[in-house]
Amino acid sequence: MKAIIPVAGHGTRLEPHTLKCQKCLLPVAGKPVLEHILDRLTEASVTEITLIIGHLGEQVREYCKTYSKAKFTFVEQTERLGLGHAVYQGLEQSEEPVLIVLGDSILDLDYNTLISSKNSTFGIDRVPDPQRFGIVKLNGNQIISIVEKPKNPTSNLALIGIYYISSQMELAKGVEYIIKNDICTNNEYQLTDAFSVMIERGHIFKAIEIDTCLDCGIPDTLSSTNRRLLAKGNSNAVHPTAVVENSDLTFCTVSENCRVFNSELTNVIIFPGGTIINQNIENKIVGFDECLDNEVSRIIL
């Protein structure tokens, strides 16, 4: 089974951190976001992975050299023309199925059930802010329409970033149609528009509700995802090269070459090279090489 993961975006909502690090490689609960995604795929025997890269793509290539449980192919999206265009770069002219997983969310669901579906099947979830998502209309469990980021959503059932497509060729034809006819949403070629074309042509899409969606696309959700994942395990994820002295940590990710002295931290993510001294803080991201010392934040040069 082949999976396509688009990770070409700049991650502007996570700047300035994503100016130095590709957003899919930002650490959460002790591992890059991408590693959490790959672990779930490989556990379901999805080991052929195509990554659509762009911004800081070389970082993604280098990281994948350290991940031994999958075989990777890299395709560079040289023009940022939308998610539909990005995924199209990784499709083959084949009737074989494909699993598409977005690179900024960690999803819990029965992956084996999803990839054994007879029909194309999308993961959906109920969201509090449907204007940010592709919203589906259902007849039973069959998707009969999709609207991308509607101003006046008719429901809160949203596409959540995982799509099993029964035929790569059918999806390719849908994307080719919207590109040829310049069908855009927000000036981009969207997957949802290609799906709508496929629905009009009689392609059947089913929906399954996922168990958990852990978003990593903005600072607040990256932080909350860190807490939820660490709460399931050993409470903290501290890199072997980090130094932690005289400090009390709960639900913290402490990356390589970090230092923590005389502090009480709850749900803090410290990116590589960060230092925290004499602090009592909660729900915070400390950036690359950033130092928090006596309430003063500065960059170590």
Image (cartoon, rainbow, N blue to C red):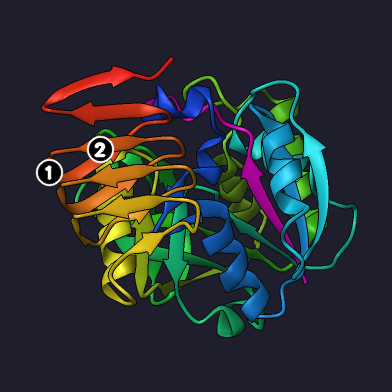
Secondary structure at badge 1 equals: strand
What range of the chain is rendered magenta?
1-13
The residue carrying mark 2 is: 276
The picture quadrant where one finds residue 55 is: top right
N-term-proximal mark, 1 vs 2: 2
Q: Nearer the viewer, residue 122 or 70?
A: 70
Residue 286 point in image, percent of width and height:
30, 35
Q: Any mark on residue 281, and which?
A: 1
Report if residue 174 is visible in the image: no
Is residue 2 found inside the magenta-colored segment of the image?
yes
Residue 149 point in image, percent of width and height:
36, 37
Mark 1 vs mark 2, foreground winner is 2
The picture quadrant where one finds residue 8 is: top right
Residue sitting at x 77%, y 66%: 68
On screen, residue 79 above or below 208: above
Q: Is residue 151 left or right of residue 61?
A: left
Q: Nearer the viewer, residue 68 or 204?
A: 68
